[in-house]
Image (cartoon, grey):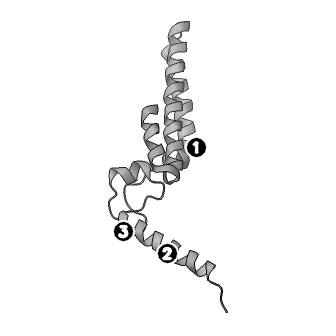
Amino acid sequence: MLALNLFFRKFGSAATHKRMSSLYHAMAVFLIISVAGFVVAKGLTDIYLYGGLAIVVALFIIFRKRVFPYRLSCPRCHARLNIKTIYFMDDNLCAACRAEAQVDATDENVAEKSPDT
């Protein structure tokens, strides 16, 4: 699970939020496995395992915007996104909307730098 997190470095700052989300998923899996190991080591009933799982699920529900930042469609034009954009890119924009956003950002930067006389 953490091996997937290494692929996020390829995208740099464009994947910061989703990289953290992947880390949260790995921490949840580690917590569940640790609780399961504790339950087996101490000879406890499965109810304790279900309690640990319920805590993890409750945390995922409370922090769902940080844990699940994935979208299947572009928020601007509602086009279906490819797997790279769904899993790696924080902006959740399709290629056309991302290019348009970059042009808009470039135009704003040029307007800020040019002095009005």
Which amino acid type is marked by label 3?
Answer: Ala
Vertical placement of residue 47 versus 4, above or below: above
Vertical placement of residue 109 versus 44, above or below: below
Q: Secondary structure at mark 3?
A: helix
Read off the residue under disc 2. Answer: 104
Residue 96 disc label: 3
How many residues crowd mark 2 within 10 Å: few (<14), some (14–19), many (20+)? few
Q: Horizontal and vertical percent for residue 89?
A: 44, 53
Q: Horizontal and vertical percent for residue 109?
A: 57, 75
Read off the residue under disc 1. Answer: 62
Q: Nearer the viewer, residue 100 or 38?
A: 100
Q: Secondary structure at mark 2?
A: helix
Q: Are marks 3 and 2 in contact (CB under 8 Å)?
A: no
How many residues crowd mark 1 within 10 Å: few (<14), some (14–19), many (20+)? few
Q: Measure the C-alpha gap from mark 3 to mark 2.
A: 12 Å
Q: Nearer the viewer, residue 60 or 2?
A: 2
Which amino acid type is marked by label 2?
Answer: Asp
Residue name at image x 43 percent, y 41 percent: 7
Q: Secondary structure at mark 1?
A: helix
